[in-house]
Amino acid sequence: MQVEDTVSDSEDEVSEQSVTAGRHFTHGEIYVSDTDFFEDEAALEVEQHLMDKVGWVEGTLSELIHDHHRSIMEEVRNKVLELETDQMVEQHIFSSKLQLIEKYAETLREMDRRLGMQYQRKIAEALDDHLIAVQRDHEHRSQIEERRIRDDAAHEEAKRREKDLKEQQAALEKNRAEAVMKADAERMEKLKVAEKLKVAELVAQRKTAEVAQKNDSEINTDIANDAYKDANKDSRKAVEFRPDVHNPLQSTGDIIKGAKNALNLEEKRLMAYKELTAKNEALGLGTTKEYDTHLKAMRRNIKTISCLEENVRVRADVLIRLISYSRWPQSISIAMFAEQIIFSFVTCFGGSNGLHYAYGRAIVLVTSQVPGAMDIVISELNKVCIYTVPKYIEYSTSVFKTKEAYCRAIGFQEDGKFESDNSYLSRLHAYMKLYGAIVQTEVEGFQNLHGHQEGWAWLARFLNTIPANLYTAAALIAFLEAAGFVLYRKYKRHFEKLMNIIARDFMKALDGKQSSGVISELRTYIESKKYLSEPKGWRLSDHCQSQVSSVF
């Protein structure tokens, strides 16, 4: 250390110095001073002068004693001087070391002071950083609050505008409905007038016939018989030359299998669809350039639906505006939406990419805000896939004269020739996946008008009335893969009972008939209880990178 080096140097310097100074000090037993020594010499001299003369021996002894005494005194004086010198050296060394210690202590105090100042500086800097962070946080929160206030104001403004648009649309619809009703009333009046004229003409003809009948009764009888025979002949020809349609004398209940409630619901939805189509045809707006522009906007927003939650929400909002707040009649937009969303899904469906959940969520979001739209969408699905009813058409040679007629009835497409079984099964799989995705969808704050209760009813009706074959097995496995997870969460033990029924009865009916991957998938789904696991793509992603531009 620096202090030890300084102490050693001080000791060396002290040892090299010649010390000549002296001082008095108190010894433990002997006290000697210069005054005492001189007093003793004076006393001796007095005594010598006072003593009588002695002999040579005594004088020599006295001198020896006196020399010895003086040598002792000299030694004592030298020893005292040496001790005083050592004491002075020690005191000097002590004071040097004390100075070094004080200097070291001062150095430590200076270091403590600097460390304290540095610590205080760090505390001050940390405090400043904390205050700056708090200030930034407050500013950020203020900005968020201001943004929220602006968003709320914008949302309120948008709601107000939407309300105004809705009122304008309602007024426009009302005016159009009144115009249609007025036109219908005028047409009915014209029909009534025409009917009255026709009745008057018939009455006149009848009177004329009665007069003529009296004169030509026999001729009239022959003519009537010939007409009856011709009518029967034409009726038989009509039955013979329509092989793709069932015989009107045979009941369709023999070939169409399905639950009565399901068939009734299908009929009601079909009636609503026909009424909507008739209304749209009466408007006569399907061939204009504006109609094509509206159709392209609808088709473009449907095709860009992806498996991102934000994308689905934005697309649904745009579609709602296109249906409810555009200048086009809502009936045309609803029919357009139902047709395009099903067509677009089947075109884009990739099997297991989870896109059916995104489309199902979009359908639920749109139809919850557009009254009557869900029935039209389900009716469109019933048209393209009879198993979404569920309904089964049994092959009968008395009704379907050819195999092609039966394939056309169950939904096979033909473009010069009928599609293959694999192509039909692929479309069937897509339709049933979409239907299953619709019934299982639950969105907070929105009502699913065709929710899991309808899915549970579909499954029960399917197992009660639909026979087992390759096509029905494909429909069943596609529906279970899409909706089985949610149906199990809702119905637990009852759903497992239905799975046992499928394994026991439905799969048993398939044994020995056909060997297909569809049947293997159904067996694997039930045996491995895949309905316990969340299916791939069921949970839409929260992150969305795409931005949607306004359509209007």
Image: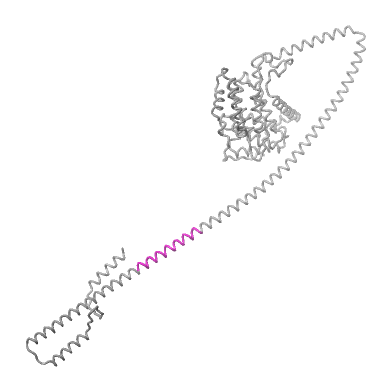
Specify the quadrant that holds the N terminus.
bottom left
Coloration of the structure image: one colour
Which residue: 76% across, 37% down? 172
The image shows residue 525 at horizontal and vertical percentages of: 56, 27
- Residue 304 visible (yes or no): no
Asked if residue 211 lies left or right of residue 440, the reply is right
Q: Quadrant of residue 6?
A: bottom left
> Does the stretch in magenta take in 327?
no
The image shows residue 267 at horizontal and vertical percentages of: 72, 26
Asked if residue 95 lies left or right of residue 319, the reply is left
526, above or below 55, in the image: above
Q: Quadrant of residue 279?
A: top right
- Residue 234 visible (yes or no): yes
Question: The magenta stretch spans which residues?
Answer: 103-127
Q: Quadrant of residue 352?
A: top right
Specify the quadrant that holds the C terminus.
top right
> Does the stretch in magenta take in 120?
yes
Label count reads: 0
Query: Toward the viewer: 444 or 37?
Result: 37
545, above or below 31, in the image: above
Query: Toward the viewer: 263 or 74?
Result: 74
The image shows residue 444 at horizontal and vertical percentages of: 64, 40
255, above or below 278, in the image: above
Which residue: 71% across, 19% down? 253
Main structural element of the magenta stretch: helix, strand or loop? helix
The image shows residue 502 at horizontal and vertical percentages of: 60, 25
397, above or below 85, in the image: above
Which residue: 72% across, 17% down? 251
Q: Which residue is farthest left? A: 56
